[in-house]
Amino acid sequence: MDRVVIENVYPEIDCGKTPIKRVVGGEISVRADIFCDGRDKISASLLYRKEDEDNWKETPMDPLENDRWSGKFTAREMGRYRYSVKAWIDRFATWQRDLEKKYDAGRDVEVELLIGSKHLDEAAGKAEGGDEKLLKEYSRILEKGEGIEEAVRLALSEEVTGLMEKYGEKSSVTTYDKGLPVRVDRRKALFSAWYEMFPRSCSPDPDEHGTFKDCERILPKIADMGFDVLYFPPIHPIGKTNRRGRNNSPQPDSDAPGSPWSIGSEEGGHKSVHPKLGTVEEFEELVEKAESQGLEIALDLTFNCSFDHPYLEEHPEWFEHRPDGSIQFAENPPKEYKDVVPLDFETENWKELWEELKSIVLFWIDKGVKIFRVDNPHTKPFKFWKWLIREVKEEYPETIFLSEAFTRPKVMYKLAKIGFCQSYTYFTWRNTKGELTEYLKELTEDECSEYFRPNFWPNTPDILPEYLQYGGRPAFIIRFILASTLSSNYGIYGPAFELCVDESAPDKEEYEDSEKYEIKNWDRDRPGNIKNVIKRVNRIRKNNPALQSTRNLEFLETDNEKIISYLKATDDDSNIILTVVSLDPHNKRAGWIRVPRGRLNIPDEQPYLVNDLLSGDKYIWDEEWNYVELDPSRMPAHIFEVRSKLRKEKDFDYFI
């Protein structure tokens, strides 16, 4: 008879159809409602295994309150895992509980000890070696009942309890009817800093097209700022038909380089590189040299074509033809993208198309690329992405796919569910305290936090937000600190960002003279840049594990709506980071922030140290509410390391 009930297992997404996401070394914490009829005690275990393993591993679950149980395991390898819950009537634990109560009440327990002896003897039949001998010996002691106090002590001891947990009878065993999925990625899926750069703009000569060799010269500068992912827009040959000119003009100059997202020409398609950038072999050399600097090259994965792409001649069936015989160009009415041809995923030859697109990914993986930023994935079928990502990650589990999808929330979340490791977000347009708080709580406290990993971008080549257009250098610092400390994954489009470029197209959130349509010659060291701020914050992120997760975010109270404050801490509170940011790039702001002393186990009246990792200043606080001032002309933020216990003289040296 199944007497044990297992319900409300968490996390369980879409009735177990959608995997939760973790990284290697990360814990999977599972909770469930577990109970039975009557007054018998129950025990429970969390089951887990790699998806390709036959046997479950087992770890005990602990009771919380109100029949809620909790257990956890650690994912040690990349790949797919399953987990479930098992529970049973624990006859021996029930007997132990009743024995203790009867003994404490002064009742005769000789018969109870005989019952316990029988439990131990039955368990001995399942044990081997030394455990079998111990159980038989303990059974004999309980059976003889000589020295009741000593026998009771033995029956309730941790040693006997441990042996019976291992070998004791499990009756009415119930196993949850689902093996719930987990996708385990490498750590960079959770913690990364991206830098986007157009290789063609890397030449030191303003009149020359940049090359991969020119990029090598810049690698140390990007690594020195603390980035670990260097992302390139498409590096393939660019079509000439309907090529766009400066500022997206439909009438380009003869020397217009075109948009990198219009892929394909007589020089090749998605498995070729633009001849002015170099060769595939030179790209491979760049990948190796980037790795030596601690950088991984990420490539843009754009599954569309120019009118000059070889696919149009080789596979016309992969494109939509209009009634007049022409091929449909890309559009999002009223916008038209006449230099781009979308692939027709509803073609009858979809299987061949899918296999070819997968071969593109595998081609670049073979060249050393393991990270892909995917352009507009929401315009292609969900089933295609689910298939492609699973196929690739089965062979190359270290591959990371970033979804560039500024789209409807449910669509964005669906892309995460089907396999994308990271995703762009609405952070770019969340500016006020209320907007940021509401959105971040959605990302970190709701169910989506189990499968959706945000990657915060304050700007992109497509987007120059209004906040950056009018806030000057302080606005760039504010948005950078918010992006890099709220989320464990973030990125910037540079050098436009660190140079605080704010010239926008009229009445648009777009760059004037966009680099998408022309080659730039950046003065990366021009006055007013924020490279040192970026370098310092990236170093803070790498030195403080609390900032290497997004789900551990906790907002704090402030009395000023223009000041936002939040806390991040490791599970054991060994690293606590308190960030305070002014949201006003124009004016000085001051206010009080509330530090949750109880949450941080700081006793009342006990002083504690806050060390500003941005400025190096140290403060001793001893109150729950503390005063801060933020001046955008100097630094509009604090990133405090909180030490709940002072380290005697060492922490006071600064003040002497």
Image (cartoon, rainbow, N blue to C red):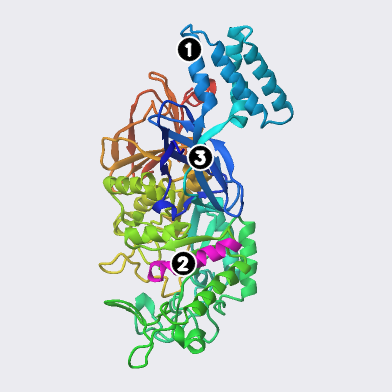
Measure the alpha-carbon separation of dots 2 and 3. 34 Å
Is residue 124 left or right of 311 when viewed as pictured?
A: right
- In x, y percent, where is residue 524? 48, 61
User: Secondary structure beneath disc 2?
Assistant: helix
Amino acid on which disc 2 is placed: Trp
Label whose residue precedes the other's in the sequence (2 or 3): 3
Q: Is residue 254 magenta?
A: no
Q: Residue at x 55, y 65 (%)?
A: 391
Task: Kindly check if marks 1 and 3 are in contact, taking CB atoms under 8 A apart as contact.
Answer: no
Q: What residue did someone put label 3 on?
A: 86
Determine whether 204 is above or below 55 in the image. Answer: below
Is residue 211 left or right of 178 when viewed as pictured?
A: right
Residue 580 visible, this angle: yes
User: Secondary structure beneath disc 1?
Assistant: helix
Q: Is residue 379 magenta?
A: yes
Q: Nearer the viewer, residue 107 or 13?
A: 107
Q: What residue did someone put label 2 on?
A: 385
Disc number for residue 550: none
Q: Nearer the viewer, mark 1 or mark 3?
A: 1
Q: Nearer the viewer, residue 76 or 554?
A: 76
Q: Residues within 10 Å of mark 3 (few under 14, many from 20)?
A: many
User: Secondary structure beneath disc 3?
Assistant: strand
Q: What residue did someone put label 1 on?
A: 102
Q: Which region of the structure is painted magenta?
A: 377-395
Q: Nearer the viewer, mark 1 or mark 2?
A: 1
Task: Kindly check if marks 1 and 2 are in contact, taking CB atoms under 8 A apart as contact.
Answer: no
Q: Residues within 10 Å of mark 1 (few under 14, many from 20)?
A: some
